[in-house]
Image (cartoon, rainbow, N blue to C red):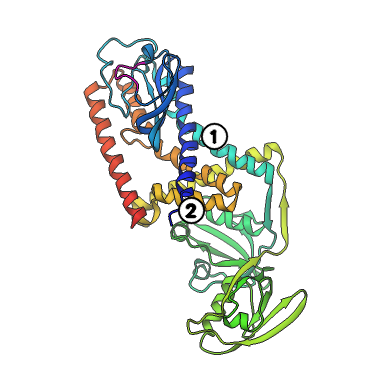
């Protein structure tokens, strides 16, 4: 059965992002002495809105509505929750409305302002999206702090994983990455995945008392993350606990219960949930001894996997010794900028890899359905994951909008730069055609990501 909460969370996320973005344009326009006759959240037909002339009304306004020359703005909600816009007088925007641009520029119009003010208005939406991301990350850091796994030693390396291909082995202790000291497992993963994204990482390790270096390319990391995989490594100190047991399955019949900690299978000490899965797969054609602990008391039993090679448990990792980090206000702001910068670099690098052919576009791009799915999943996990998703999407929206694509902020900004260089306005007909081409490109992209979401 379809869950309507998917739509609700999608509208909530898009509403937050679009409102913040368009509010940036609107505030910048007002500060620059420009007028705007429409502030709209959503696209398509007007559902309802408010302005000082007609008050609160439902449905369309008259065709000749202009807010008395832009003095009054109509704040409206439109039918389709897929975007928004601020209609600034004297500017060719997504509406392609050029009927008022045949007259002399007025002091309150976009076209009458200098290049600096135009650029300020055009980039204000992107700036607001970045500020939103920084604010969310900083707030999370200040209110929640950070809990990290203290160990930097490797307890398990999954077969066929990036970690194994690089050369990591159980027992290795990660000391440095590109010369920076590593102080926790989370810090190690962050430096591997998010810093200097496209560069080769040199990882200093201690292997049985001998220091040596391993190298891993940024492209290999990006390809792994884009395929929704991880490094395939877990730290030492992890306890593998059973989250749930199929009562009539092999493990349930042997007496295993939810909450039990698996210590060994077939004589192999279990280092993580993934390790447990691997050991069971390796021995799925015969019975083996499973050892576990319950309330500090050891148990063991011989278990034979079922016809599918499973023993009927859902394992999870319980992290070992933790490192608690508390941030001051200024440190939290620094964390906000750092995480925003890291997320920005990861997104830009992903786009570069798509254009270079290293990552398939259908693998990396998502549309409304994917956003709705991610919104619902993150909301189910709690407010922090949900806000983190909003911050990540805000960064994505900022980058996409600043690209020099027709109909986007970057496309408008391109014309401003050109006009500043040639010292005259680009012909109106050229701007309209440019916008029309941009609308076709955007509609084609939306069709592609929607098709990709469905299939």
Residue that appears at 60% across and 47% down:
384
Residue that appears at 37% across and 18% down:
110
Q: Main secondary structure of the magenta part?
A: loop
Contact (Cβ within 8 Å) of mark 2 with mark 1: no
**Is residue 44 shown to the viewer in this render?**
yes
Q: Residues within 10 Å of mark 2 (few under 14, many from 20)?
A: few
Magenta stretch bounds: 61-66
Q: Position of residue 171 (x, y in %)?
A: 64, 72
Instruction: Classify residue 137 by image quadrant.
Output: top right
Alpha carbon distance from label 2 to label 1: 27 Å
**Is residue 178 shown to the viewer in this render?**
no
Residue denoted by label 2: 199
Viewer-closest of 442 and 416: 442
Instruction: Classify residue 209 by image quadrant.
Output: bottom right
Residue denoted by label 1: 131
Magenta-colored stretch includes residue 5: no
Residue that appears at 62% across and 83% down:
253
Instruction: Classify residue 142 by image quadrant.
Output: top right
Q: Position of residue 334 (x, y in %)?
A: 63, 39
On screen, 51 above or below 173?
Answer: above
| Screen quadrant of the N terminus | bottom left
So how many labels did they put on this image? Answer: 2
Q: Nearer the viewer, mark 2 or mark 1?
A: 1
Viewer-closest of 21 and 382: 382
Label 2 sits on a secondary structure element that is loop
Q: Residue furthest right?
A: 296
Mark identifier at residue 244: none
Q: Position of residue 402 (x, y in %)?
A: 40, 35
Viewer-closest of 390 and 419: 390
């Amino acid at each position: 059965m379809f869950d309507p909460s998917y739509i609700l969370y999608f509208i909530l996320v898009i509403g937050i992002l679009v409102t913040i973005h368009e509010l940036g344009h609107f505030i910048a326009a007002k500060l620059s002495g420009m007028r705007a006759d429409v502030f709209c959240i959503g696209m398509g037909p007007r559902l309802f809105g408010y302005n000082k002339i007609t008050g609160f009304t439902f449905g369309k306004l008259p065709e000749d509505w202009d807010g008395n020359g832009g003095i009054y703005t109509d704040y409206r909600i439109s039918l389709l929750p897929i975007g928004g816009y601020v209609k600034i007088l004297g500017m060719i925007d997504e509406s392609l409305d050029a009927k008022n641009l045949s007259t002399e520029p007025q002091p309150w119009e976009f076209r009458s302002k200098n290049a600096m003010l135009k650029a300020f208005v055009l980039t204000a939406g992107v700036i607001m999206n970045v500020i939103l991301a920084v604010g969310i990350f900083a707030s999370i850091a200040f209110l929640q702090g950070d809990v990290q796994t203290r160990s930097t030693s490797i307890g398990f390396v999954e077969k066929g994983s990036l970690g194994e291909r690089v050369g990591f082995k159980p027992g290795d202790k990660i000391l440095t990455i590109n010369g920076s000291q590593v102080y926790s497992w989370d810090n190690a993963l962050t430096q591997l995945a998010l810093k200097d994204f496209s560069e080769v990482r040199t990882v200093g390790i201690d292997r049985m008392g001998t220091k040596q270096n391993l190298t891993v390319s940024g492209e290999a990391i990006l390809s792994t993350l884009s395929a929704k995989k991880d490094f395939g490594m877990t730290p030492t100190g992890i306890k593998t606990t059973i989250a749930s047991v199929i009562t009539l399955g092999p493990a349930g019949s042997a007496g295993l219960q939810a909450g039990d900690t698996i210590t060994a299978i077939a004589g192999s000490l279990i280092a993580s949930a993934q390790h447990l899965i691997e050991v069971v797969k390796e021995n799925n054609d015969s019975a083996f001894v499973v050892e576990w602990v319950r309330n500090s008391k050891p148990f063991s039993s011989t278990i034979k996997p079922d016809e599918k090679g499973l023993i009927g448990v859902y394992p999870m990792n319980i992290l070992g010794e933790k490192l608690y980090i508390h941030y001051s206000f200024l440190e939290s702001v620094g964390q906000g900028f750092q995480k925003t910068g890291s997320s920005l670099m990861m997104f830009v690098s992903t786009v570069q890899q798509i254009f270079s052919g290293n990552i398939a576009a259908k693998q990396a791009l998502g549309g409304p359905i994917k956003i709705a799915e991610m919104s619902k999943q993150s909301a189910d996990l709690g407010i922090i994951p949900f806000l983190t998703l909003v911050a990540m999407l805000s960064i994505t929206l900022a980058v996409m909008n600043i690209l020099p694509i027709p109909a986007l902020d970057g496309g408008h900004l391109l014309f401003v730069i050109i006009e500043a260089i040639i010292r005259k306005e680009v012909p109106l007909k050229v701007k309209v055609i440019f916008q029309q081409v941009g609308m076709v490109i955007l509609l084609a992209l939306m069709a592609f990501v929607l098709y990709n979401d469905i299939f």
